[in-house]
Image (tube, rainbow, N blue to C red):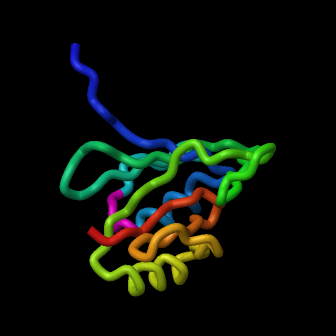
C-alpha cells in the first residue's frame, strides 16, 4: 500500500458557507455536500482536495501568534498572478486582510470563519 495526500480539512461552524467561499475563490468544484461535511476539488485533479467539517465550537487562531492564545497550526498558501487584484477579490467574497503583514509579496487574510490564509506571488 502507498500513502498519498488526499485533502486538507478545515473545521468550521458552517461547512457549506465556508466551502462556498473557497469554491468561488479557487474556482474549484464541489464533490460532496452534507450538513456536516463539504468537499471541493480542483477541476484539473482529483487530489489534493479541500474539505470542511462541522466544528460548532471552532475558535479561530490569533495572528500574529501570542503566548496563551489559540495558535495557528496550519494555513493555506495560495499563489496568485496579481496580488492586489486577488486580495480585493477575496475581500469582496468575504475575507478580511490582517493588520500585520510580514512580507511585501505576501498578504495574510482570514476567510469568513477566521482561518488565516496567504496569497502570494510566484
Whether residue 48 is in magenta: the answer is no
**At 80% from the left edge and 43% from the top edge, which residue is drawn?**
68
Q: Which residues are magenta?
A: 25-29
Q: Is residue 90 left or right of residue 99?
A: left
Task: Judge whether 73 appears above or below 119 on screen.
Answer: above
**At 33% from the left edge and 36% from the top edge, which residue is drawn?**
6
The percent position of residue 104, horizontal first and vertical second, equals 44, 76
Q: Quadrant of residue 62?
A: bottom right
User: In the current view of this chain or complex, which residue is farthest to the right?
Assistant: 68
User: In the current view of this chain or complex, which residue is farthest to the top?
Assistant: 1
In the foreground, 12 or 85: 85
- Which quarter of the rendered picture does the N terminus lie within? top left
Q: How many numbered marks have been drawn onto this rendered protein structure?
A: 0
Whether residue 26 is in magenta: the answer is yes
The percent position of residue 92, horizontal first and vertical second, equals 53, 83
In the foreground, 103 or 45: 103
The percent position of residue 110, horizontal first and vertical second, equals 59, 65
Task: Judge whether 115 appears above or below 120 on screen.
Answer: above
Q: Is residue 64 left or right of residue 21?
A: right
Task: Judge whether 60 appears above or below 106 on screen.
Answer: above
**At 55% from the left edge and 71% from the top edge, which residue is drawn?**
101
In the foreground, 106 or 88: 106
- Which quarter of the rendered picture does the C terminus lie within? bottom left
**At 65% from the left edge and 59% from the top edge, which residue is drawn?**
64
The percent position of residue 9, horizontal first and vertical second, equals 49, 42
Q: Quadrant of residue 85?
A: bottom left
Task: Judge whether 48 appears above or below 94 on screen.
Answer: above
Q: Does residue 34 appear anywhere in the picture?
A: no
Amino acid at each position: 500500500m502507498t500513502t498519498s495526500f488526499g485533502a486538507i480539512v478545515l473545521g468550521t461552524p458552517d461547512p457549506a458557507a465556508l466551502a462556498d467561499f473557497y469554491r468561488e475563490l479557487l474556482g474549484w468544484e464541489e464533490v460532496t455536500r452534507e450538513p456536516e461535511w463539504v468537499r471541493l476539488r480542483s477541476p484539473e485533479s482529483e487530489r489534493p482536495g479541500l474539505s470542511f467539517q462541522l466544528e460548532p465550537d471552532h475558535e479561530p487562531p490569533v495572528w500574529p501568534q501570542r503566548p496563551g492564545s489559540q495558535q495557528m497550526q496550519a494555513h493555506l498558501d495560495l499563489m496568485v498572478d496579481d496580488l492586489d487584484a486577488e486580495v480585493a477579490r477575496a475581500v469582496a467574497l468575504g475575507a478580511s486582510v490582517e493588520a500585520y503583514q510580514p512580507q511585501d509579496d505576501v498578504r495574510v487574510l482570514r476567510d469568513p470563519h477566521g482561518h488565516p490564509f496567504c496569497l502570494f506571488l510566484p
